[in-house]
């Protein structure tokens, strides 16, 4: 995917040739700080972030919608959301994780908005096996209301929720999770395990409440 394929994006993102070389050497954290400090006066820092993660976001969107046009449109919308929300980004997670959360929520909301037909249990299992949000013996928990799943995720501790999203939704290896969260490998494994157990417990409790009602 190239920038010029995102209709209207040219007015927001300058061309790559105009990018000073030093921006490509900056870390994500440095670019975020520069973008927050300079705002609309200078978009070059955010431009570099866009170029680093446009393909990553596009792939996530394509997996959700299954066609290029929808994926491109959603990619453009997600980066506009990220740009507008950047002043409030506190850096508690990496920029990549933050953009991933925006992507996940945006795709879910758009799918719900379009009122597409419900996903069958068989399709849902196949999808969850790909993402491995929970161990395979717990896949049955994930059938049904995505609003409820999102609600459960929001009840997890911030660090555990991020670890769970990185490992089981984004598919990172444990060492990559550790690097993203700046913790030891053993700590990353423990954090993911705690997150999975907490997710399972909260989800089962919410299901029990619904059954009683």
Image (spheres, grey):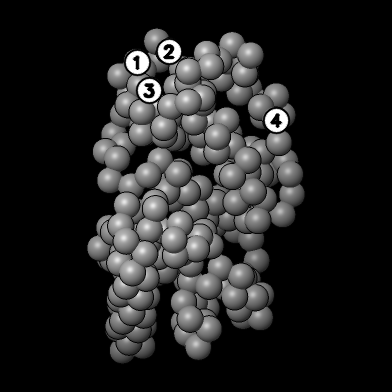
Measured Cα–Cα span from mark 4 to mark 2: 22 Å
> Is label 3 in a helix, a strand or a loop?
helix
Q: Are marks 4 and 3 in contact (CB under 8 Å)?
A: no
Distance in Å between CA atoms under marks 1 and 2: 6 Å
30 relative to 105, above or below: above
Cβ atoms under marks 4 and 2 closer than 8 Å: no
Q: Are marks 3 and 1 in contact (CB under 8 Å)?
A: yes
- First along the sequence among labels 1 and 4: 4
Residue assigned mark 4: 2
Task: Report helix, strand or loop for mark 1.
Answer: helix
Measure the alpha-carbon separation of dots 3 and 2: 7 Å
Percent coordinates x, y for residue 76 in the rendering: 58, 34
Please name whichever residue, 47 or 146, is drawn nearer the observer in this view of the structure. 47
Separation of disc 3 and disc 1 at Cα?
A: 5 Å
Q: Quadrant of residue 64?
A: bottom right
Task: Check disc 4: other Cα within 10 Å, few if <14, some if 14-19, many if 20+.
Answer: few
Question: To which residue does mark 3 refer?
Answer: 35
Instruction: Give x and y (percent) for residue 187.
Output: 30, 67
Task: Label 2, secondary structure: give it.
Answer: loop
């Amino acid at each position: 995917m190239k920038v010029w394929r995102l209709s209207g994006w040219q007015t927001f993102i300058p061309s790559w040739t105009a990018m000073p070389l030093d921006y490509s050497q900056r870390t994500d954290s440095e670019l975020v700080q520069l973008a927050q400090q300079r705002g609309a006066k200078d978009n070059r820092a955010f431009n570099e972030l866009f170029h680093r993660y446009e393909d990553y976001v596009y792939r996530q969107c394509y997996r959700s919608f299954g066609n290029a046009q929808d994926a491109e449109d959603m990619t453009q919308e997600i980066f506009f959301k990220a740009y507008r929300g950047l002043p409030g980004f506190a850096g508690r997670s990496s920029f990549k994780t933050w953009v991933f959360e925006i992507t996940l929520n945006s795709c879910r909301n758009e799918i719900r908005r379009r009122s597409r037909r419900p996903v069958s249990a068989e399709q849902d299992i196949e999808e969850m096996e790909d993402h491995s949000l929970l161990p395979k013996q717990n896949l049955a928990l994930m059938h049904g209301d995505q609003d409820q799943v999102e609600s459960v995720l929001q009840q997890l501790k911030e660090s555990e929720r991020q670890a769970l999203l990185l490992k089981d939704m984004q598919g990172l290896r444990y060492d990559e999770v550790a690097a993203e969260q700046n913790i030891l490998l053993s700590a990353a494994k423990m954090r993911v395990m705690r997150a999975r157990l907490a997710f399972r417990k909260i989800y089962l409790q919410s299901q029990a409440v619904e059954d009683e009602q």
